Amino acid sequence: MRTDLIRKTVLTAAGIAAAGGGIAGPAIAAHAAPADTKPAQVQDRKNNSSERELNVRYEAQPNFYYCGPAATRNALSVQGKDINVDAMAKEMGTTEAGTNSINDITPVLNKETGSNVYKSVEISSTKADDKQTDKLRQDIVRTINDGRAVVANIAGTTTDTDGNTHSYEGGHYISVVGYRDGGTEVKIADSADPNTASYWVSIDHLADWIATRGYSTN
């Protein structure tokens, strides 16, 4: 069933989303403005083990269903790579129904980094438990410390640390590009709207956002 998807943090961003269940469910973003070359405001803080942010050359997704390729492009940009989103969309099998699964993202990340360091991790339950949440935190900290970003397939609504709501009931892909307080809070690069290109969420909220889906990590 197709339903209207409203991103509550912006006034005009809207798109059409198809509800998807489980890790293989389609993930579709709200309609985003044309790509913006202005980078997200992030910094690399190598000398502080409790926090680190990677430099992202941010671009918004060009249409409502390219969140998978756009999140992957933003993630790869922290390594200085600039891969065409159309080429990645073709490799991922992206259609107007979205990119089917995180398992379609991981092989592209490995291909473009020239290694097999990325793997898919599933949070199959409807709500993440403490063990799953702590594993997510450890995975994010390790991956970012290695100079790589995490790509996550999320669905539903969450609230960031500033109290702003981000809602993708039909599903979406985001990049995780930083952490602070030892990974209890993480920084998101979100391709859906350049006006909210980045924000912080708690690891508990992110784990529940990923629940029923999965993420790509070292």
Image (cartoon, rainbow, N blue to C red):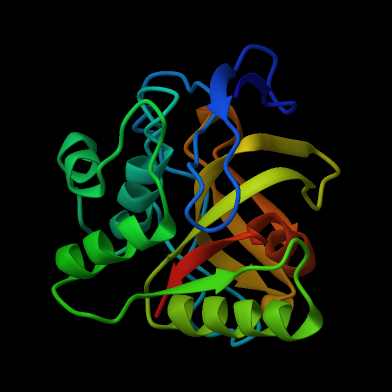
Q: Residue 37 at what x, y percent from top left?
A: 34, 32
Pick whichever, 195 or 152, lies toward us.
152
Q: Where does residue 7 sit, x and y in percent of width and height?
A: 67, 26
Q: Which of 83 and 5 lies nearest the eye of the viewer?
A: 5
In the image: residue 21, left or right of residue 60: right
In which quadrant of the rendered image does the N terminus lie? top right
Please provide percent x and percent y for residue 138.
60, 85
Where residue 10 sits in the image (x, y, percent)? 68, 22
* Quadrant location, the C terminus: bottom left
Q: Is residue 211 visible?
A: yes
**Quarter residue 120 falls in:** bottom left
Q: Determine which quarter of the picture holds residue 125.
A: bottom right
Residue 170, quarter of the rendered image:
top right
So how many labels did they put on this image? 0
Position of 120 compared to 80: left or right? right
Q: Nearer the viewer, residue 157 or 98?
A: 98
Image height check: is 26 above or below 188? above
Name the residue: 53% across, 28% down.
193
**Residue 96 placement, left or right of 127:** left
The residue at the point 78 percent across, 64 percent down is 127
Give the residue at x 41% y 35%. Answer: 98
Q: Determine the residue positioned at 78% across, 67% down.
A: 204
Residue 84 makes an appearance in the image: no
| Residue found at the very far front of the displayed protein | 1
Is 3 located above or below residue 117 in the figure? above
Residue found farthest to the top: 12
